[in-house]
Image (spheres, rainbow, N blue to C red):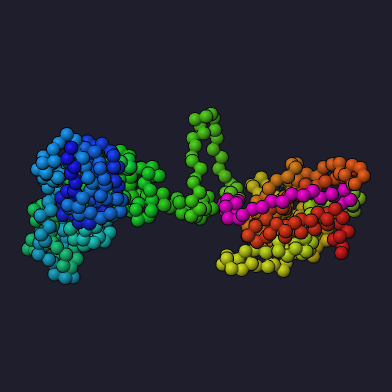
Amino acid sequence: MAIEIIPVPDLGGADKVDVIEVCVEPGDVIEAEQSLVVLESDKASMEIPSPKAGKVISLKVKEGDSLSEGDAILELELEGEASSESDDAPAVESTAEAEETAVAADAEEQAPAAPAGATSQQLVPVPDLGGSDSVEVIELCVAVGDEVAEGDSLVVLESDKASMEIPSPAAGKILEIKLAEGDKVSEGADLVLLEVTGSAPAAQPASEQQSASEQQPAAAQKPAPAAQPAPKPAPAAISTATDSRESAAGVYAGPSVRKLARQLGVDLNKLKPSGPRGRFMKDDVRSYVKQLVADVNSGKVSGGSGIPAIPEVDFSQFGDIEMVKMSKIAKLTAANMSRSWLNVPHVTQFDDADITEMEAFRKSMKAEADKRGVKLTPLPFLLKAAAAALEAEPSFNVSLHADGEHIVKKNYIHIGVAVDTPAGLMVPVIRDVNKKGLWELAAESAEIAAKARDGKLMPRDMQGGCFTISSLGAIGGNGFTPIVNAPEVAIMGVSKAQMKPVWNGAEFIPRNMLPLSVSYDHRAINGADCGRFFTYMVAVLSDIRKLLL
Ligand code: COA
């Protein structure tokens, strides 16, 4: 068995070409013509086939390397050949073929330059396609009116073996596009009409150039292809063995699309191609990035969190389904919840408040409440108790400053109340709760809840909260873990009060127990702070006379 170093073949004039994919690994047994690496210049991607069959001993390249002709790709143990044979064999069989198929490299000579500042029109034809005929236009890279620099891609053509970008022979402005995506073209076909400015190379002898004012019908201007400054070789034609859509990564995309994807850090494997025959288009990359940015902005995904998205599932495969549009509030709530859940390290503490006396007092006030036209529910008592606890434990009445260096201490006590509405969850804020009495709070909470349900809240009504109360008491449940309504740092969850047997040291006595939970942002609040806050609040609710102290 002979060992041979497989070098980079003639790259059609390209130099320092990036390795974007290594298709084999040491130990792989490969066939002749099997792709070894995919190289990509700014004009073309090319798969380099193995000239021989054998076993890969070691790799001499890795992704990201830049290679030129002659650089070693890998060490190959040849299959059933003596080393002398391999020495004689050309390192890459397709080199001659490549030269044949590469696009007229030697036609790079430039015609006389136009005088600086003068404009002329140049009809750019399809260059020598290395023998290919009827090649499909798969992408137009320019639009009428675009300014292009010399070498900018005009179109991407694709045969069944390679894709090639046809560069502009000169800088100028696109006046007309002579073909459309999907057209089949051959050498000499009109590509674009270019208005060339200044000393750019002319496409035809200077004597045949015309100024814009002397424009003749396009057909009359068509220069002989030989006079064209032909584009640089399309090295993709080197690889005649593998269809570009069958790269190891399974990605079927032209060089410009790959380049755009690389520049934007997009992994093409994550996209769905929209082009013909499953080909990726630049717009696929752009739409993907646009969607990603929109998702981050809307909070659907957390920027940079690296949390994998929940895969999309086609539920219709399991049964009948119905698609219901989310309300604006539901979408905002989803975004806010995700933001808070992902950003805030939550801790939730639970306790029961003995509200037997409070309920007795509340019920005793029913006649008075009716007289005032107000419904006195447990909510105003909870608001008062929370305000008292916020005053007693000011570490709860803060927000973390965005600079990461400060805590914002608030000298006011505004409390939000979560209200369930047909349009979704809303959190109107009651201001200066500590300065208001139970009747005032009862009236105000009923008023804001009604406003919320009628969709009459203004944005300001929902701003400025220091703390939130989320009460499911009228509905049920033993306890839940509410999500902090950031930038607030704590929230209280209220569940359904129930009569429970409570040991008083001598006997079990029936007491009305209210299950409460407090979730807090552990960046701002310590467990001990929460212990003090919660104990105080439970004590206040158990004996509302403490509110007078
Ligand atoms: N335990 C037992 N009963 C309770 C209770 C509790 N914790 N809280 C309220 N109740 C009772 C009330 O006393 C009232 O009974 P009554 O008519 O016999 O006096 C009944 O439940 C209905 O109260 P409600 O009208 O809901 O008033 P409220 O002041 O308690 O609540 C809102 C007002 C706005 C909080 C409430 O209507 C609401 O929208 N709750 C849902 C909030 C929500 O969805 N939170 C989840 C966020 S994730």
- Of residues 40 and 286, the one drawn nearer to the viewer in this rendering: 40
Quarter of the image where the C terminus is located: bottom right
- Of residues 248 and 175, the one drawn nearer to the viewer in this rendering: 248
Verify whether residue 352 appears in magenta.
Answer: yes
The spot of residue 81 in percent (x, y) is: 14, 36
- Of residues 94 and 99, the one drawn nearer to the viewer in this rendering: 94
Is residue 31 shown left or right of residue 376? left
Verify whether residue 436 appears in magenta.
Answer: no
Which image quadrant for residue 546?
A: bottom right
| Total marks placed | 0
The spot of residue 153 in percent (x, y) is: 24, 54
Please give the range of residues in magenta.
335-358
Would residue 366 be seen by someone viewing this image from the given angle? no
The spot of residue 258 in percent (x, y) is: 31, 50
Instruction: Tell me the residue at 16%/64% (across/down).
Output: 200
The spot of residue 468 in percent (x, y) is: 70, 56
Q: Residue furthest bottom?
A: 116
Q: Residue furthest top?
A: 319
| Looking at the image, residue 458 lies above or below residue 425 | below
| Looking at the image, residue 231 lies above or below residue 478 | below
Instruction: Tell me the residue at 18%/37% (across/down).
Output: 1
Instruction: Tell me the residue at 87%/51% (across/down).
Output: 358
Would residue 248 be seen by someone viewing this image from the given angle? yes
Is residue 346 shown left or right of residue 135? right
Instruction: Tell me the residue at 57%/45% (across/down).
Output: 326
- Of residues 347 and 209, the one drawn nearer to the viewer in this rendering: 347
Is residue 258 shown left or right of residue 323? left
